[in-house]
Amino acid sequence: MWAINSPQSGRRIEQHSSGTTRQRISKKNLATIPIGVPPISEQRRIVEAIEGYFIWLDSAEAAIQTGLRRCTRLKASVLNGAISVEWPNAPLGEYLLSLRNGVFVSRPAAEPPGFPILRISAVRPMVLDMKDVRYAPGGTPKVDSNCVEEGNLLFTRYSGNPDYVGACAVVPKTTEAIAYPDKLIRAVVDETRMDPRYIAIAMTARLGRQQVESRLKTTAGQVGIAGSQLKTVRLPVPPMAEQVRIVKYVETALAEVDRIRDALEQTLARVTALRRSILQKAVSGDLVSQESEDEPAALLLQRIQTDRTVSTGSKSRRMKVTA
């Protein structure tokens, strides 16, 4: 089992596999995959060593996964703890100068030339990936007039995943004009009264998110929310100085959580790489020491071939007797 799961065997299996969406390999091709056959006593030592290492790696991986789940809960705790229901609340729409859907572009290209336009996937809760773009062909109507600017808010208007609908992120400083598509909504905030970064925090925290989810509508398998509904979400509104303090606290705390998460994910990748390395060493004969009293592999293979020949002959005689 371990030999066939090794990286070396995996590459050979890929070479003999077929299929586009789902790779598969026939029994005939699988039977042709060569694997090393060390002496049986060495095989047992190899298996014992692999299982010993993997028990330790399983424990490490379980601890890492627990840490990643705690990071997710810690992020939610930071956001929820930053918003107080004791402040006066008001509809989001009272603090917006405009709220507008993006422009429809049919089949934007993956590469230039063209006008850059954000993909729907660019917006995630409190995160905007300005590099996640496609390119609208020249002459696309109104594309250059539907651009985002620093401090704008972008909301996801439609998605197949309800967790992303109503997701909100702030547009960072950018040096190039980038449009946004019709499945995103751009909000221009009155920054003399509300900090856009605070709005993103409040909309992502439990209080705001619950209101967004109560306004979602499903049409033809797609979940969506209208801009008019977003305007009605009521948010606690602290003084501007308090908003700035909250933003600084949340950004600092979330950056630290992200640092911890990145470290855990890197460690998880090393665990995966170490598993592959152990299997590779196992099939290369470098995982355990070889002992002089082990039966030579050549004799083992000869005995296997002899047993197979005897077994085939016995089967043939049984078939003749039956006939």
Image (cartoon, rainbow, N blue to C red):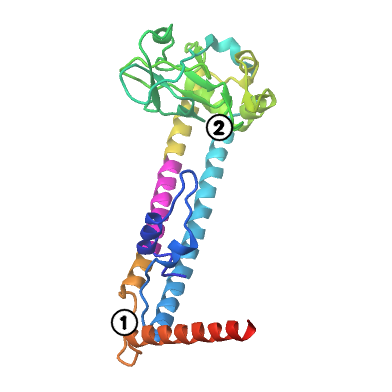
> Residue at the spot x=38%, y=22% of the render?
109
Q: Is residue 85 visible?
A: no
Query: CB under 8 Å between callouts 2 and 1?
Result: no
The overriding secondary structure of the stretch rendered in magenta is: helix
98 over 246 or under it: above or below: above
> Badge 1: how crowded within 10 Å, few (<14), some, or many (20+)?
few
User: Looking at the picture, how far across and down is residue 122, in whole percent?
Assistant: 45, 27
Decide which of 220, 190 is in the foreground and name it.
220
**Mark 2 residue type:** Ala
User: Looking at the picture, how far across and down is residue 61, in whole percent?
Assistant: 48, 59
Residue 282: which quarter of the image? bottom left
Residue 156 appears left or right of 278:
right
Residue wearing tag 1:
289
Q: Hey, which residue is sitting farthest right in the picture?
A: 214
What is the magenta range?
256-276
> Residue at the spot x=36%, y=58% of the render?
11
Decide which of 297, 212 is in the foreground and name it.
297
> Residue at the spot x=43%, y=64% of the render?
5
83 over 273 or under it: above or below: above
- Name the element at disc 2: helix
Residue 267 appears left or right of 323:
left
Kindly identify which numbered label has been placed on residue 82. 2
**Mark 1 residue type:** Ser
Q: Hey, which residue is sitting farthest bottom in the picture?
A: 293
